Each structure stands twice: as structure tokens, then as C-alpha cells.
Amino acid sequence: MKQILILYYSRTGNTERMAKAIAEGAQINENIRVEIAYHVNAEELSAFDVILVGTPTYHHEMPLDFKNLFEEVAVKGLSLKGKMGGAFGSYGWSGEAPRLVLEIMKNKFEMQVVEPPLLVKYLPDQKMISNCRELGKRISENLMRGA
Ligand SMILES: Cc1cc2nc3c(=O)[nH]c(=O)nc-3n(C[C@H](O)[C@H](O)[C@H](O)COP(=O)(O)O)c2cc1C
């Protein structure tokens, strides 16, 4: 069984809508388990085959909880090397946070990242929700192919 984590933070629900749509799209068959979570610890994180992080941008930053999590993975020397990673999130005007997450995944943890990140300005409309579902589906298909 392959495992996909969708870890997200959302204060007003916009990134949460994206996370749920990605999860729906990713659940393509019974050989994939999709977990959607607000918080995991470093050991839990490193048990997944795919890690997707949903982060809005507040004050040009990602949430402190995600910074602490990446710090914990690094300090404990846990390996995420070669795992598939992605990032998405709602934003208002600058939207840096998902790019910052991908940068860390790629440069620090040597993960295989899906670029570019999926960004939505404020509330996702139906078109963006369907783009989210499509992203989830594509990631699961890649995982099943062993890509
Ligand atoms: C206090 C505050 C600071 C914000 N800072 C930024 C920012 O630096 N860059 C940006 O693109 N959007 C910024 N935003 C907009 C949020 O990213 C946007 O409202 C987003 O949809 C929130 O997503 P969420 O509902 O998942 O929390 C800010 C919003 C607030 C309330």
C-alpha cells in the first residue's frame, strides 16, 4: 500500500478546500491511502511515500508549525530523499509560502518535487477545485507507475 500525506494549514478555509479536492483526486484506487492532516511529527512524516504540503502565505511566510517540522526532520537526521513532494496554497498578493516549501524539499531533503506549486488567489473557484483534483490524480498515477 502506497501512502500519500496531505499536510495543510488554513486559517480561513481557502487552503483547506484545496487540500480536500487534492485528496479526492488522489484517491484513485484501493492501493493508495491518502491521509489528510493538520499536524504530524517528523517520524510520521518520513513514513509517507508522497508528501504534499498546503500552506497559505501570511506575512510572506509559511506557518511556524511547518518550519518547526522541517527543522525536526533535519535535526533527527530523518531521510526524505527521493520521496515525491509537492506544495500548494491560497494567497492574496505574493504567495511565497508554497515555493519556500518546495525549495526546502528540493535543496535540503533531496526530494523529487512537482513544480510549479499550485497557487490559488483567495477562495478557489470550481475551475481551481478541478485543477486541485487533477493534481491529486496525476500524483497518484505517477506514484503507481513508480515515477
Ligand atoms: C494578516 C494577513 C497577512 C497576510 N499576508 C499575506 C502575504 O504576505 N502574502 C500573500 O500573498 N497573502 C497574504 N495574506 C492573504 C492570505 O494568504 C489569503 O487570505 C489566503 O486566502 C488565506 O488562506 P487560508 O484561508 O487557507 O488561511 C495575508 C492575510 C492576512 C489576514
Image (spheres, grey):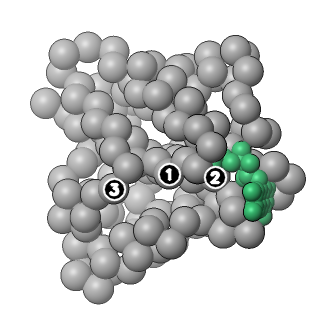
Q: Position of residue 142 (x, y in %)?
A: 39, 29
Mark-to-mark CA distance, 2 and 3:
15 Å
Q: Quadrant of residue 98?
A: bottom right
Q: Position of residue 81 (x, y in %)?
A: 32, 63
Disc 2 is placed on an element classified as loop
Q: Counting residues from the N terminus, which is met first, the one under dot 2 or under dot 1?
A: 1
- Above or below for 59 versus 139: below
- Above or below for 82 versus 128: below
According to the picture, the residue beneath numbered tag 2 turns out to be 56
According to the picture, the residue beneath numbered tag 3 turns out to be 39
On the picture, is 14 further left or further right than 27? right
User: Callout 2, which amino acid?
Assistant: Pro
Disc 3 is placed on an element classified as loop
- Residue 70 appears in the rendering: no
Residue extending farthest front: 12
Q: Position of residue 29 (x, y in %)?
A: 26, 14
CB at mark 2 closer than 8 A to ligand 1? yes
- Rendered residue at 42%/19% (across/down): 24
According to the picture, the residue beneath numbered tag 1 turns out to be 9
CB at mark 1 closer than 8 A to ligand 1? yes
Q: Residues within 10 Å of mark 3 (few under 14, many from 20)?
A: some
Q: Are marks 2 and 1 in contact (CB under 8 Å)?
A: yes
Which quadrant of the picture is home to ligand 1? Answer: bottom right
Decide which of 2, 90 is in the foreground and name it: 90
- Rendered residue at 53%/37% (across/down): 16
- Rendered residue at 34%/38% (across/down): 36
Q: Counting residues from the N terminus, which is met first, the one under dot 3 or under dot 1?
A: 1
Q: Position of residue 6 (x, y in %)?
A: 39, 42
Decide which of 114, 6 is in the foreground and name it: 6
Q: Are marks 3 and 1 in contact (CB under 8 Å)?
A: no
Mark-to-mark CA distance, 3 and 1:
8 Å
On the picture, is 45 further left or further right than 123? left
